[in-house]
Image (cartoon, grey):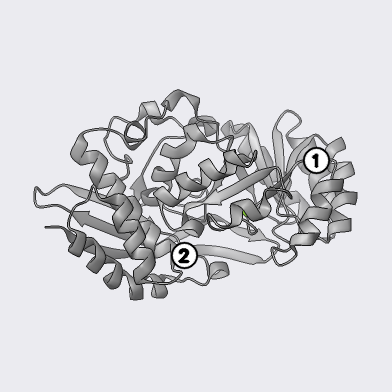
Amino acid sequence: MLTTATERVSLPLEHAFTISRGTTTEAENVVVRITDDGDMTGVGAAAPSAHYGETADTVEAVLPDLFAVVESVGDPHALAEIEARMREAVEGNPAARCAVSIALHDLAAKRLGVPLYRLWGLNPGTAPDTSFTVGLDDLDTMREKTGEAVEAGYGTLKLKLGTDRDREVVEAVREEAPDATIRVDANEAWTPRETVEKSRWLAESGVEFIEQPVPASDPEGLKFAYERSELPVAADESCVTLADVPRIADRCDVANLKLMKCGGLLEARRMIHAARAHGLEVMLGCMVETNAAIAAGCHLAPSLDYADLDGSLLLADDPYEGVPMPDGEIDLAGVSRNGTGAVER
Ligand code: MG
């Protein structure tokens, strides 16, 4: 017998967060708890994104249908069956399904007495560091935020681009962080030709790769940019679910997965394997998320090339504690709790 509960949490950001599509000052997540008859509880959360058609309201609206699936299967270890049946029960709604998937994985690992990465046979020592994102802002603020991030010890920065000031932004940030690894994310704001042009001076500034330069609705443009860019290209908005992996395989270098896009931890693991089979590198990103969700992503980190799991680091205050990230290092071995390690503060 499994019982379920939900709670909506408002998460104010430390700084207003701007990307090429708009500004966020607060995120709403929906926390899900699933408790077994031995009183053990798994916790997860949905971080809905309007870009993919979800809000906290849509998440709350479909959760009863998802919980009905969980209750009818009744076994918290039947993760594959539950994820598959949830996908049949509701169309889309990936963040809502993901919240349930995370809570169940947390519960299953706790019942077995292991941290989640152990359930998957992963080595906690091989996780890449997470990047820390500097949102779009005026140049002085971006300099200031970069200085703070460097001061805090983050060695990898992700810069949001997509304005007519892109070159000044990269130069200013590079000046503040001469030794940092810098990645840039245009969030679909560039044309294919612009991407190729910008890749030349981005390469000169020592940028590592370009994320989602062109709109996901323009797969031919992505191919054009990928074939001519001076820098590797990562696909984020173009890479949503498992079915997208073969579609992007000949037009990018890196698949950027997100739990909230693909709808579950098992689905994310399938995407990692599929991406590898197609010769792609793998990155895991996130939304603006509480640790109740991010912690699960951290357990996948040993199977990634790049981690962008700073969603909780950008919050003013997270009601959940998760996997510690000192200086951006995802310290899985430093968590003494079983499951995902997420716990209410
Ligand atoms: Mg992105």
Residue at point 44% right, 58% down?
Answer: 263
* x and y, in percent, of residue 33 in the image: 25, 57
Residue type for callout 2: Pro
* x and y, in percent, of residue 156 in the image: 64, 35
Disc on the earlier residue, 1 or 2:
2
Residue at point 42% right, 35% down?
Answer: 324
* x and y, in percent, of residue 46 in the image: 40, 60
Instruction: Count neighbours of disc 2 (C-alpha within 10 A) and say few if under 14, some if 14 to 19, many if 20 or more.
Output: many
Query: CA gap, disc 1 to disc 2?
Result: 31 Å
Q: How many marks?
A: 2
Residue toward you, 62 or 245 = 245
Residue that label 1 marks: 231
Residue, far left: 38
Disc number placed over residue 48 in the picture, else none: 2
Report whether 82 appears left or right of 239.
left
Q: Kindly report which numbered mark, 1 or 2, lies closer to the viewer in this rendering.
A: 1
Quadrant of the snapshot with the N terminus: bottom left
Q: Dot 2: what SS?
A: loop
Report whether 229 appears left or right of 129.
right
Residue toward you, 15 or 196 = 196
Residue at point 21% right, 33% down?
Answer: 113
